[in-house]
Every structure is written in C-alpha cells, then in structure tokens.
Amino acid sequence: MNTSNETKTNLTINGVVTGNPFGGVSVSRVLLVLITLVVFTLLVKLGLWQLSRAEFKQQWQHTLALREQQAALNYPQLLSLTKAEPSAFEESNLLTGYRLSLHATPVKQPLLLLDNQVYQGQVGYLVYQVFEVTAEQPWILVELGFVGAGNDRRELPALAPIQAGQYAFTGRVYQKQVNPLSDELHPEIHPNKPIRFQNLTMPALAQLLQHDIAAVVLQPDNVPQHSLPQPWVPIPLSAQKHQGYALQWFTMAAVFLGLMFWIALRQFRHQS
C-alpha cells in the first residue's frame, strides 16, 4: 500500500473503525438536519401553545357562565375582590362576568371615549361616564354603549351625559387585561368635549381625573336616557379559534417535515 496517498474511506482493522467517522458527512447535511429540528420543534410548540390557550378559554367560558348565575354583588364586595384578585397580567385574575348592583350619581367629568373599537363592522368608540357611589369610595366607569365614528376624526360624537340624579344600576362588569406593550392612556383633552383615549388603563385614568377609580367597568342592563348598543366580548378569541390555529401549526409542521425529508432524499440520490 502506498502510504503517501490519503485514503478517503474508513478502514476497519479487527472490528475497530479508524479515521474520522464523520468524514463523509457534509456541512450541508448537518445544517439541513439542524434547521429541520429547530423549525419543526418551533411549529409543534406553537401548536401546543394554541391548544393550551383553547383549554384555558373553555375553562374561562365555564367561569363566566357560573358568574352570570350568581347573585349580584354590592359595591363593597366588588371592591374587596379587586384587592384580593389584582388583574396583573393574568387573565385568570380578571373580574369579568360578575354581576353588580349599586346606586350611584354622575360625576361632573367629561364623557370618556375609548378609541379604535369595532362593532358589527363599524369603527367607533365605547362611551363611558364616571359615577360616584359614596364620597369615600373609588369612582366607577359606567359604559353607555357604542357609538360610530365619523369620517373626520376631528369631529367627536355629540353625546349628552346622563343627567344629575341618583340611579340604580344592575349589570355585569368587565376588566381589560393590561397590555404591557401598549398600555399608555394617550388622552386627547379639549374644552367642553369628551376625552378620547387609547387604552382602558385604570391607574392612568385615575391619575388623569385625580381620583381613585375602580378596576372594573360596569355594563348596566339598562342605561338611563340612552339606547346605544352594548358589545359584550369577554373572550376575544374563542376556544374553537385557538383549536383551528393549533391545527394550522401542526399541519405546517407536517408539511415542513415532509418537504425537508424530500430534499434530503434528493440529495442522497444525487450523491450516491
């Protein structure tokens, strides 16, 4: 044997493999395997996450149904829940769905317009009015309903607030989950006009109005002096939608794995 020539194959002597066992493995094949594993694992994890969200939404829907059947809370009971179950960033801590009954009077504050709301395909605002239960307790926002926006954003809807007096309200409450990526109030304040704002962030709103505000909004069964539609969307994405998204991710994972297997098979046939 000519020892000056390098062998390109592994030699087996007495059952022992000599040389580099990975000498025949190209860099492209290694990259192909790594990319396949990373992308396939990511797609499967996204599908599993969607399934976990679907399971949570099913449990949340059951919780909302139970709260709907419970007797209405009074205002002190609701305030105690806001202290015992802070919203933080977890949906499971939200107080949405509880029934509430109280007597309250309007506060001399402008109406509040939550911007970028959609109802039945129309863009507009959710309208809120500030009410006081007692002088010592936080104010509470009462939702008057949805109003459409005009073509000119400089023109705000012409709405009259509920007139002064004491009113008995019974309805359900909801609490928005804080979005850490977009939680700024961004209020637009003009004399003798409603305040338009971008996010229902209670601490910032309390600072703007210089008074404590309850962490929830009351959507009453009947709104005095108004007949605006009242959207109720406690669960933005249903469990069925999350299951559909999970199926899409799993399908993408299967298609991707099949594609990469086909590419690897073609490379093997080409090199053999």
Image (cartoon, rainbow, N blue to C red):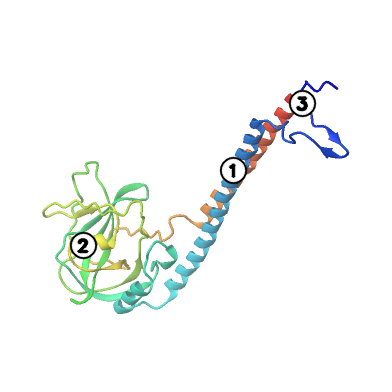
The answer to which of marks 2 and 1 sits earlier in the sequence is 1
Q: Residue at x 37, y 50 (%)?
A: 120
Label 1 element class = helix
Q: Nearer the viewer, residue 167 or 94?
A: 94
Q: Which residue is drawn at 37% across and 73% down?
A: 99
Residue with the mark numbered 1 = 38
Residue bearing mark 3: 8
Which is closer to the viewer, label 2 or label 1? 1
Q: In this view, does 203 lie above or below 115?
A: below
Instruction: Provide residue 158's location: percent of width, then percent of height.
Output: 18, 53
| Labels in figure, total | 3
The answer to whether 51 appears left or right of 152 in the picture is right
Give how far across and how far down residue 133 sits, in percent.
22, 75
Q: How far apart are marks 3 and 1 (CA)?
A: 32 Å
State if disc 3 and disc 2 touch (CB < 8 Å): no
Calculate the distance from the C-alpha at mark 2 to the C-alpha at mark 1: 47 Å
Above/below status of 242 relative to 70: above
Mark drawn on residue 207? 2
Disc 3 marks a residue whose amino acid type is Lys
Report which quarter residue 28 is drawn in.
top right
Q: Above or below — where is 110 with respect to 101? A: above
